[in-house]
Amino acid sequence: MKDIKDYIFESEDNITQDDAQRELLPPEERYCVVQTGGSIGEQSSFKYRLGGQACRITRDNMTNEEAKEYAKRMRKFLTPGERRYYGISYKAVLFSKLKEI
């Protein structure tokens, strides 16, 4: 019988396998998906700014199409409370447009 750790490591390997094999894209083509909004407690983990708004990277090193699709999928899973009350959203942005805090 498998231990719970075996399942966790298997799922992490499946998720990151493509990202680990992909070379880092050039800066002018490197897109990422950022999360904006959230509760006050989450704000300490936000390391970047996008147009004056704090944000954090949820996925990096993607093409424009991949980033837009991933952001759309992540927005779809948000509850109405997360959207309205916490103001959480996901956006696909060019990595060079982010400023480190």
Image (cartoon, helix red, strand yellow):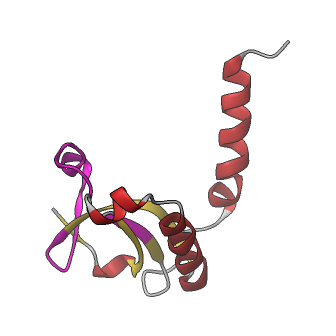
Above or below for 17 versus 2? below
Horizontal side of 72 relative to 35 (left or right) equals right
54 to 93, vertically: above or below: above
Q: Residue at x 65, y 41 (%)?
A: 12
Q: Residue at x 25, y 48 (%)?
A: 45
Q: Residue at x 70, y 52 (%)?
A: 17
User: Residue lying farthest right?
Assistant: 1
Q: Is residue 85 left or right of residue 66?
A: left
Quarter of the picture containing the C terminus is bottom left
Residue at horizontal 33%, vertical 80%?
A: 96
- Tell me the magenta residue range: 33-53
Q: Is residue 68 left or right of residue 81?
A: right
Q: Is residue 7 above or below residue 73?
A: above
Q: Is residue 96 visible?
A: yes
Residue 68 falls inside the magenta stretch = no
Residue 16: image x %, image y %?
A: 64, 51
